[in-house]
Image: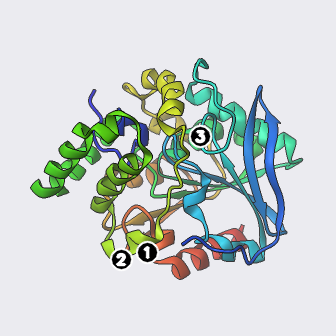
């Protein structure tokens, strides 16, 4: 299986900054499930765990866009294994089960009885694995622009991304990959390649300036530790397993996203208590393109449950 499109499965590429207005209650490393994960916790109230996409990205691209949620909720951002400012271990073998176990260890470390989870993009996979492994430890799940929960639909979505790519962008991508700077692992070129891919998933590309992945200097090296996920990504299919998830689920879909609508519809059909809301003026990052509506929608959903 060849998954080309990097915005959905970030590590296959390789292959506004803001002063916080909300109180930071914790920032730093915690020992979690045999490694050290980096956390940033802002706000007070009922906890909401934020699971970022990638794999290999980090929590920074959510900020400052989700800050207003911290007025009523404690937002727990973290960088996944070998990502962002978390500990790097290129020799580790990681699977989606590993990421699920990390989420359970986070729940225990923060003393949370039942988790509220907001997952974005690729983060839907570890969040779903967790929901299947620990359905009794969940309160709600919010899927924001989830990648398809099967390899088959992921391939279809990748094809949509390829079809939306202009010939000029394809040429630019080839030039960036062939550039000596990319071969040397210079982060400016890696960032340029990533941003080029993201063009296809914004309704309004002028809003891309509000997206900042803040890739660390060790991003390319860290991506090597994610190779164990390759086996999990071949032929995966979570849809038949979703029936064990009984909690309320919100699915937020951007109409300009490359993720095929069928993927989100199958989540809804597989879950007894799921709702889909479409953001007509958003792509893969509705919390950037329709920020106020996104945060209002999340607040209402959390308040209702």
Q: Residue drawn 68% across and 74% down?
A: 19
Q: Secondary structure at mark 2?
A: loop
Q: Are marks 1 and 3 in contact (CB under 8 Å)?
A: no
Q: Earlier in the sequence, mark 2 or mark 1?
A: 2
Is residue 144 shown above or below 246? Answer: below
Residue 297 visible? The answer is: yes
* Mark in the foreground, 2 or 1: 1
Q: Secondary structure at mark 1?
A: helix
Q: Earlier in the sequence, mark 3 or mark 2?
A: 3
Q: How many marks?
A: 3
* Mark in the foreground, 3 or 2: 3
Could you say where residue 130 lies in the image, as x and y percent from the top left?
65, 38
Quadrant for the N terminus in the image: top left
* For residue 128, side relative to residue 176 (left or right): right
Q: Secondary structure at mark 3?
A: loop
* For residue 179, side relative to residue 166 (left or right): right
Front residue of 195/157: it is 195
Could you say where residue 205 lies in the image, as x and y percent from the top left?
31, 71
Q: Which mark is residue 83?
A: 3
**Which residue does the numbered mark 1 point to in the structure image?**
289
**Which residue does the numbered mark 2 point to in the structure image?**
281
Cα separation between marks 1 and 3: 25 Å
Pointer 1 local density, CA inside 10 Å: few below 14, some 14–19, many at least 20? many
Residue 204 visible? The answer is: no
Residue 148: quarter of image: top left
Pointer 2 local density, CA inside 10 Å: few below 14, some 14–19, many at least 20? some
Is residue 124 shown above or below 97? Answer: below
Cα separation between marks 2 and 1: 7 Å
């Amino acid at each position: 299986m060849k998954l080309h499109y990097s915005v959905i499965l970030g590590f296959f590429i390789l292959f506004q900054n803001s002063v916080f207005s909300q109180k930071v209650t914790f920032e730093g490393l915690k020992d979690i499930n045999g490694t050290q994960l980096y956390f940033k916790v802002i706000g007070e109230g009922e906890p909401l765990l934020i699971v970022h996409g990638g794999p290999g990205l980090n929590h920074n691209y959510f900020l400052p866009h989700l800050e207003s949620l911290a007025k009523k909720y404690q937002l727990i951002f973290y960088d996944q294994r070998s990502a962002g400012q978390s500990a790097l271990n290129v020799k580790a073998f990681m699977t989606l089960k590993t990421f699920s176990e990390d989420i359970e260890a986070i729940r225990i470390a923060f003393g949370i009885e039942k988790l509220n989870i907001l997952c974005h993009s690729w983060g839907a996979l570890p969040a779903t694995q967790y929901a299947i492994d620990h359905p009794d430890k969940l309160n709600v799940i919010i899927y924001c622009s989830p990648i398809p929960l099967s390899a088959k639909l992921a391939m279809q979505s990748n094809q949509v991304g390829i079809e939306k790519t202009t010939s000029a962008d394809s040429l630019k991508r080839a030039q960036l990959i062939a550039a000596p700077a990319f071969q040397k692992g210079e982060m400016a070129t890696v960032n340029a390649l990533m941003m080029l891919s993201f063009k296809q998933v914004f309704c309004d590309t002028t809003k891309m300036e509000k997206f900042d992945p803040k890739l660390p200097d060790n991003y390319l090296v860290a991506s090597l530790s994610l190779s164990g996920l390759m086996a999990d990504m071949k032929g995966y299919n979570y849809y038949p397993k979703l029936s064990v998830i009984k909690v309320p689920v919100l699915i937020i879909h951007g109409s300009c996203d490359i993720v095929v609508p069928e993927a989100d519809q199958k989540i809804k059909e597989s879950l007894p208590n799921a709702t889909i809301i479409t953001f007509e003026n958003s792509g893969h990052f509705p919390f950037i393109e329709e920020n106020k509506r996104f945060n209002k929608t999340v607040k209402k959903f959390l308040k209702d449950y």
